Amino acid sequence: MIGQLCAIVIDCPNPSELADFYGKLLSLSRIDDTPDFVVLGTPARKEVVAFQRVHDFRPPQWSVPGHPQQMHIDVMVADLDVAEPQVLALGATLLDGSDKPVGYRVYADPVGHPFCLLTPLE
């Protein structure tokens, strides 16, 4: 095992409004709430889905290549330096992130979808 699913992150123009919609749809509660990032989860505070503000947001359109679906997966790992060679071996490409073993790194999957490896903030 390389890591665990941490959250699905959805780009949007207003995280609070979209979190209201998904909170009601999925019966989830807010567990983190800032103007630019809202996290919904279960009563046990397990993260499930997050919403991040994108200032130049263009809504996705189903099956239209010029309007991508705009979400990514966050994967929690114990150590970025240990997990990175494993995801690169699977076909990922490093896009951006911390050069330290604590923090985050952004990768693209083999067809270009972004995903992040994160370490706990503790």
Image: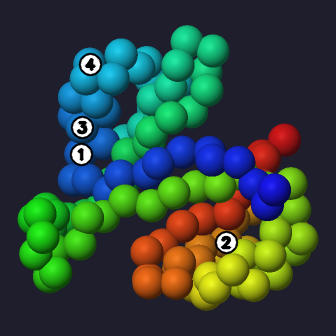
Which mark is first along the chain, 3 or 2? 3
Q: Which mark sits nearer the N-terminus, 3 or 4?
A: 3
* Foreground label between 4 and 1: 4
**Residues marked 2 and 3 touching at CB (< 8 Å):** no
Q: Which residue corresponds to mark 4? A: 24
Q: How much space separates mark 3 and mark 1, taking CA atoms?
A: 6 Å
Q: Position of residue 65 (x, y in %)?
A: 16, 81
Q: Say which of marks 3 and 1 sits in front.
A: 3
How packed mark 1 is, by other alpha carbons closer than 10 Å (few <14, some 14-19, many 20 or more), is: some
Please, what is the three-letter code of the amino acid marked with disc 3?
Answer: Leu
Q: Position of residue 72 (x, y in %)?
A: 45, 61
Mark on residue 105?
A: 2
Asked if residue 73 lies left or right of residue 104, the reply is left
Q: Is residue 111 left or right of residue 95?
A: left
User: Sequence-wise, which precedes: disc 4 or disc 2?
Assistant: 4
Q: Which residue is mark 1?
A: 14
Q: Which mark is residue 97?
A: none
User: What secondary structure is marked by label 4?
Assistant: helix
Amino acid carrying label 2: it is: Arg
Q: CA distance from mark 3 to mark 4?
A: 10 Å
Task: Residue 45: name its quadrant.
Answer: top right
Residue 79, image quadrant: bottom right
**Label disc, if present, on residue 18 of the rendered structure:** 3
Q: Quadrant of residue 107?
A: bottom right
Q: Which of the two discs, 3 and 4, sits closer to the camera?
A: 4
- Judging depth in this view, the residue of 53 and 93 nearest the camera is 93
